[in-house]
Amino acid sequence: MCGRYAIIDGKKVLVAYTAFNKAKGTAQAFQELPRYNAAPMQRLPVFAIRHDELVAEQMQWWLLPHWSKDGKPSFSAFNAKAETVDQSKLFSPYFKGSRCLVPADAFYEWKRVTTTHELHGKSKKTEEKHPMCIRMNDEAPFMFAGLFSVWKDPQGNEHPTFTIITTEPNELMATIHRRMPVILPEQHFEQWLDRSYKDAEKLKKLLVPYPPKKMKAYRVSAFVSNSRNEGKECMKEVGA
């Protein structure tokens, strides 16, 4: 699962991935950054091919199918499972032709930890959830593999939405959670965004765990657990 992430500096993204400098709309897409605690239902920057050109635009994080009658989310659609994304009635149409990239600097996951306390002379076990921040070792930005949909209201106004694809965890993430978001290497960006490319078998082979040696994870405070909280404190290491 991926239910929270950070995207801090759009300029840093464009420096890291120079091909996206030609994307239309980058200034508007990144204008509300930094976002240290991005959460589902919020509007966040996404790269995609729209109307035959590369664009950066804000989309709502929670995929709303184009065929929705009322424009209200009725499915848990902020994540899509890599294993079934080509078979899902909800996600498969977008996997075939509406793929996107979601820039991020970090993501958060909650690690279940069992602790033992002494209470009235007896040992008592309790389970705690420790928020963890996961990012690249060099703290460079990266790209989640995503899907997008464009719902139109009765007036014809477009409402673009997206979901982040998840896969099984790598060795680092396996100690924290049973899932992790798909982080796509740069050499696959063009193929992933190409809406005319429809080889589902080859596309699914891209949806694998990211190399753990390139990543790090550290505990952060419970401040990040409340999606209303924002700021650098979300990413600050406990005890640092």
Image (cartoon, grey):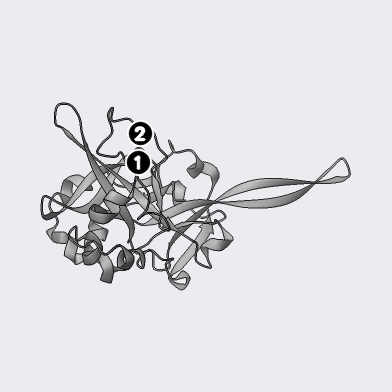
All told, the count of numbered labels is 2
Is the residue marked by circle 2 packed among few (<14), some (14-19), or many (20+) residues within 10 Å?
A: few
Please give the label number shown on residue 73: 2
x 50%, y 52%: residue: 109
- Dividing the picture into quadrants, the one containing residue 43 is top left
Is the residue marked by circle 1 packed among few (<14), some (14-19), or many (20+) residues within 10 Å?
A: many
In the shown orientation, is residue 59 left or right of residue 112? left
Q: Position of residue 238 (x, y in %)?
A: 55, 53
In the shown orientation, is residue 83 left or right of residue 55? right
Please give the label number shown on residue 62: 1
- Dividing the picture into quadrants, the one containing residue 31 is top left
x 19%, y 57%: residue: 195
The amino acid type found where label 2 is placed reads Pro
Q: Is label 1 in a helix, a strand or a loop?
A: loop
x 50%, y 42%: residue: 225
From what the image shows, is residue 191 above or below residue 30? below
Q: Position of residue 221 (x, y in %)?
A: 54, 47
The amino acid type found where label 1 is placed reads Trp
Q: Residue furthest right?
A: 121
Mark 1 and mark 2 residues within 8 Å of each other at the beta carbon: yes
Which-is-in-front pick, marks 1 and 2? 2
Please give the label number shown on residue 185: none
| Residue 31 seen anywhere in this rendered image of the structure | no
| Residue 193 seen anywhere in this rendered image of the structure | yes
From what the image shows, is residue 170 above or below residue 61? below
Q: Position of residue 155 (x, y in %)?
A: 14, 27
